[in-house]
Amino acid sequence: MLKEERQHSILNEVELHNRVLLTDLAEKLEVSIDTVRRDVKELDAENLLVKVHGGAVSLGFANHSPQQSNVYAQDKKIAIAKKAVGLLKNNSVVLIDGGTTCLELARLLPVNLKLTCFTLSLPVAMELLRKPNVETIFIGGTLSKGSQIAMGSSTINALSQIKVDYSFIGTGYVDTEFGLTEFDWDVVQTKKAVINASKKAVLLCISEKLNSQHRFKTCDLNIINTMITELEPWDSKLDAFKNLNIQIL
């Protein structure tokens, strides 16, 4: 594989999953970790991704700005966010997870909608502060430098004290058999706590992530109440998910 092709593949993986490990990239591309590390360093120097310890994150995931013009598949994530807004009612208590699709949801909340909204994402919290009728409660903890999301024991303990009407969550990988998975054990523990803190959990997921899996399991799909993609519910790409006890929007 040529260097240009390899780097294109790296960018695709980073943009789709927001965060990737060098070891996973090396395995997928069948090259050494040193080769992948050099590629990531070059892509970081070209301002195409952000190099972090042991991996890389997408620009849209790492850098929060009001314009947010560097988000991968932003039109699809906006379509998902619009569907999610339709679930909300005045005076609901909700939790919005981190990630670029959840950030689009925060951005699209109607200004007249009254909500109490918990979040563990600093970028999401900053967007919520723009909404005059949303009471924003930030759940603290150890902030990830890459994602600007709180994690760790303090975050999990705080989540154990609440029960929201809806939690809106993202995931790196989703599969009918393996459920929701991530490459990061700490992320999984936090997402489990988010799901436990909600009466209903809503998964926001672009269709490109369907039928993918990774090491650490967050939950089975039937733990999720609703899955929202940019596709129409009757799309054939969703056929395998229709046999599960889950609402598809």
Image: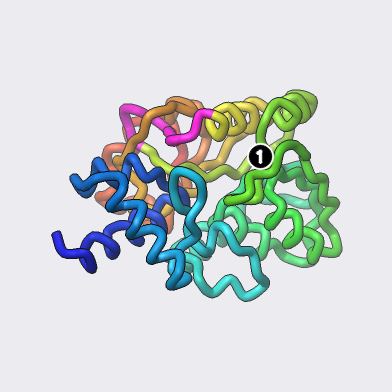
Image location of residue 113, percent across then percent down? 78, 59
Q: Nearer the viewer, residue 44 or 209?
A: 44
Q: Give the residue furthest to the left.
A: 1
Which residue has dot 1 on it?
166
In what quadrant of the picture does the N terminus appear?
A: bottom left
Q: Which residue occupies 47% across, 71% down?
A: 47
In magenta, the rendered stretch is 175-185
| In the image, residue 177 lies in the stretch drawn in magenta | yes
Query: x%, y% of residue 61?
Result: 54, 57
Q: Is residue 18 above or below residue 217?
A: below
Q: Residue at x 43, y 35 (%)?
A: 183
In this picture, is 72 found above or below 205?
Answer: below
Total numbered circles: 1
Residue at x 50% of width, y 71% of height: 70
Tell me where residue 130 sits by quadrant.
bottom right
Q: Position of residue 134 (x, y in %)?
A: 82, 55
